[in-house]
Image (cartoon, rainbow, N blue to C red):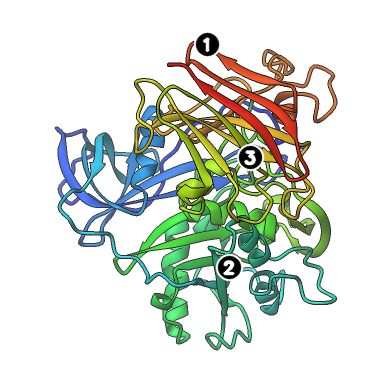
Amino acid sequence: MQRCIRALASLAFAGAAVLGASTGVAQSAERFQGILTVVWGDPPPGMAGGEERFTLTLPNGTAYPLAIAPASQNTALHFNGKRVVVSGEAFRNGAGAEAIHVLRIAPDVSGTVAPSPPATAAKPTLFLLLRYKDDSQEPHDPQFYLDLTNPKTPPKGSLIPATLNGFFSKTSWNQLQWQADVGGVGGLKHTDWLTLPFGKTHYANCGSSQACADINAIAADGLALAVTAGINPANYSAINFVLNNDLDCCSWGGSFIYNGTVFHGTWEAPWGQETALYAHELGHALGLPHSGWAYYSYDSPWDVMSMGTPVKPTKCGSYSSANNGGKMETIYCSAPGDGYIAPHKDYLGWIPAANQVVLSAPATKNVTLEANSWPLTTAVKLVKICLAGQDCSGAHAHYLTVEARLHKKSYEKGEPGDGVLVQDFQSDRGAIGGGCFFNNQSGWVVPIDATPGDYDSKNCNSGGRKWPDYALGNAEFAAGQTYNNGTLGVSVQVVKQNASSFDVTVKRTK
């Protein structure tokens, strides 16, 4: 139900880049211009690990790993996929590659925009089937990935309980769909999986306890194979690199650059090739960070970008796991059970201004707040409470959000209860870590717990309580409960629960 609680993993920076005249010794600050991309590595549910990598790609195509202080990483996420100016010092990282220690990062105001594929009503996406040179197994046939993505409901007789377009159509209120092709031997005719030029250890020379995968090499070699097979990557906005065996600790999602253009990307091991986990990594590909980290890593059951609460787990395949001594591992397909949180939907532009109530000054508002899982019509979906003396938008914003949750509808049926979520959104929040956090990949949003004090943060356990009666499992505010913060001058009173909404009174006094 929750991911293992282990000690904070150390942060490593991987990648392949060479600074022409560097001696490997730290230099005085230099100025670099290029496009920033970010990827996240996430372990399987119930396991530890993970990493967040930042890369700067210069106009000549040279890519540098960036060492950004944890306190500044969430601010940098706002520039993901955009042109930036970096002030920093060159050094050799732990992998022996040249990298840049970032002193300052800011948007490039020169007026040029980072190239990206053309916008379309349905984002064209390619599932590129790649097997390691020393491993001939194929966890699924090519048709599986089309069935996983394109229809809104799974084909009759399929072992897939939910599709990507079913999820994204619902959670985006029909504002995002994917149009998938599958690439393999024969190009888009996909008669067989493409074979990478090297074995698994060339791309990921470690097991499940480390983050070592060279996803840039997989992308470069995989796209070279695709082009040779007659596939034009420029026709797609997202590339899903589908591996036939394990990578490292993780599967990965984020942005990458190919031929000067920014793409959404995922790198999925077989255990991650299913709707609930693709929803997480594609969220990263769209630019979303994690949420939660109130008590431990991935601790919010209200967001697919955190714990994830999948439903309908179904055996849908198997593979011989390289990271588990060749043991046959069952692959489970499931349906996402907790959707995306409202502040992330707002960041993606899915909540129109007409469906928001914003308190930009002291005021009291009575709002009927419709549940996140209901269709988008004219009802209010998000309340945003700006805070005195704080920005309410941009890379240094800090405000509170209020949204309603009812777990009766599809893709939110895994949520632990019904109620109102109050969340703290801070664009420049420092990375959260500590003894109960096995990684510090926290994001902008941390839920405010309606029942604080019901998690044992000293021993990193539930203190004998059963789920969901601890940590963020019971974070929702029910009818009759009120959130009060005198320091911020904010209160949120949940007055009444209706069939599809909650009546709330929101007050800002400062």
Q: Amino acid at mark 1?
A: Gly
Q: Between disc 2 and disc 1, whose residue precedes? A: 2
* Viewer-side residue, 279 vs 132: 279
Q: Between disc 3 and disc 2, whose residue precedes? A: 2
Residue at image point 62% right, 58% down: 278
Q: Quadrant of the N terminus?
A: top right
Q: CA distance from mark 1 to mark 3?
A: 23 Å
Q: Quadrant of the C terminus?
A: top left
Residue 132 versus residue 301 in the image, above or below: below
Residue where numbered disc 2 is placed: 132
Q: CA distance from mark 3 to mark 2?
A: 50 Å
Q: Quadrant of residue 50?
A: top right
Residue at image point 62% right, 40% down: 306
Residue 267 versus residue 48 in the image, above or below: below
Q: Is residue 28 among the parts visible in the rendering?
A: yes
Residue 213, horizontal then vertical, whole percent: 51, 52
Q: Amino acid at mark 3?
A: Leu
Tell me if 452 is positioned left or right of 434 in this view. right
Q: Quadrant of residue 199?
A: bottom right
Q: Between disc 1 and disc 3, whose residue precedes? A: 3
Residue where numbered disc 3 is placed: 369
Q: Amino acid at mark 2?
A: Tyr
In this rendering, which labeled residue sits more in front, label 3 or label 2?
3
Q: CA distance from mark 2 to mark 1?
A: 58 Å
Tell me, for residue 486, which label it has, or none: 1
Residue 346, horizontal then vertical, whole percent: 49, 46
Which element is circle 2 on?
A: loop
The crowding category of the residue bearing disc 2, from other C-alpha atoms within 10 Å (few below 14, some 14 to 19, many at least 20), is many
Tell me if 188 is positioned left or right of 27 in this view. right
